[in-house]
Amino acid sequence: MVFLAAAAFCIVPLPLAGEALVADSGMKRGEGELRAGAGRARIPLPEHPVLAGYAGQRRSREKADEVYARAIVIEQGRVRAVIAAIDTLLIPEGLESEIRARAEIPFCALIAATHTHTGPGGLWPSTIAGWIGAGAFDLAQRDAVVLATANAIAEATAGAGPAQLRVGRELWAKGPARSRSGAAIDSELVALRLETPHGGAIATLVNYAMHPTIAPRDRLSADWPGAAARQIEKASSGAPALVLQGAVGNTTWDGASDPGTRIATEAEWLLEQTAPLRGASVECGVKKVSLPPWQASPAVPWPFRRAVANVFALMLERKAPSGAQTRLAIGPLTLLGVPGEPVGELALRARPVKLVGLADGYLGYVETPERWAAGAGESGKTYFGPDLARALGLWPQ
């Protein structure tokens, strides 16, 4: 009987629970005065919290630094948008929904993980996901992340006032990011600063693609995004600094010391080269997209592919796969959320739109269809087949 059950698991696809929906809110454009506020809240954790980032069950032996949720609220007329950066590995869909409900977030929000591999885990109520790298489910830690993010958003909302912005971007070939699978990466560094009309910093946003796998595995740490955020905040009189991942899927770092400081210093220099923009508009839209069925990579030996795909189904609770994408334009900068880890080539194709990885859910790695079909690059880490990039609008149909 056990043999027959195992054989069936390797042959028969598990059914979906429910149907995926397709909906597009369209882009909404703000009018009138630009307003912005920002907030930061520490995530309260026990002495030895569950960690996320690597396979197995891990707890922190010691605390390298505090971890935070940071948020920006941008308002213009009837348009109100939220951007949140949380010092953790990823944002499971259920967690994102809880944050939205707790903080009473409007339809337009980018809720993203900094992707530190030594941040608080236990946020995904799935045993399989916990062993793969999300950490053993811990309801108290999940609640702590939700509360901190909601508090950061509340602080940002309460403090919103008239704002102007600066936006700088550069192709930073000498930056610390490197390719780990031979394909192109997105080396662009983007920095945005919201200021009061008199030039005081309200908040800073930085987008750069590089896996945060630098900190020791047994220490709670925000890794290089936390180090960069702290330095920028120190330089801007404590104004919150959000560090977001770009197309992080196939990136690693060059091994040089203190990449967080390098990134913060470069972002500050980049912002100094820009002039403040007054009268900038805000546009935002959210799209819900149906995604392909779960599919194991060609890198998995063919007799085991159905079994691996069924494991994905169990991990995702066999829900009909769907994904939400937020597109947020702030002046000349357009950010597009991706609920996973896109590779660099997808970001190069999306320019001038800037991808924000690990945003509003998690669907695994997003590889190009060509490299996926060849079993190359990051295809071995994907949950869906070659059409995932197409479904997310990152590759031609």
Image (cartoon, rainbow, N blue to C red):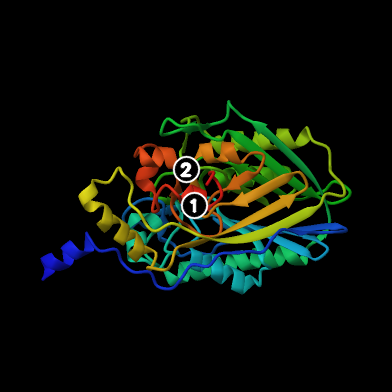
Q: Earlier in the sequence, mark 2 or mark 1?
A: 2
> What is the secondary structure assignment of the residue under circle 2?
loop
Say if 119 sits above or below 354 in the image.
below
List the residue tagged with mark 2.
249
x 46%, y 51%: residue: 388
- Count neighbours of disc 1 (C-alpha within 10 A) and say few if under 14, some if 14 to 19, many if 20 or more: many
* Residue 49 location, quadrant: bottom left
| Amino acid type at mark 2 | Gly
Q: Position of residue 185 (x, y in %)?
A: 52, 34
Q: Quadrant of the N terminus?
A: bottom left
- The tag on residue 340 is 1
Q: Position of residue 31 (x, y in %)?
A: 85, 59
Q: Position of residue 284 (x, y in %)?
A: 71, 57
Q: Position of residue 120 (x, y in %)?
A: 46, 58
x 33%, y 47%: residue: 297
- Count neighbours of disc 2 (C-alpha within 10 A) and say few if under 14, some if 14 to 19, many if 20 or more: many
Q: As drawn, which residue projects farthest toward the front? A: 397
Using residue 348 as the reference point, say whether residue 302 is left or right of it: left
* Residue 277 location, quadrant: top right
Q: How many marks can you see?
A: 2
| Residue 39 visible to the viewer | no
Say if 169 sits above or below 59 in the image.
above
Using residue 281 as the reference point, say whether residue 327 is left or right of it: left
- Residues tagged 2 and 1 counted as in contact (Cβ below 8 A): yes
| Amino acid type at mark 1 | Gly
Q: In this view of the protein, which residue sits in the foreground, 170 or 394?
A: 394
* Residue 372 location, quadrant: top left
x 42%, y 63%: residue: 122
Q: As drawn, which residue projects farthest toward the top? A: 174
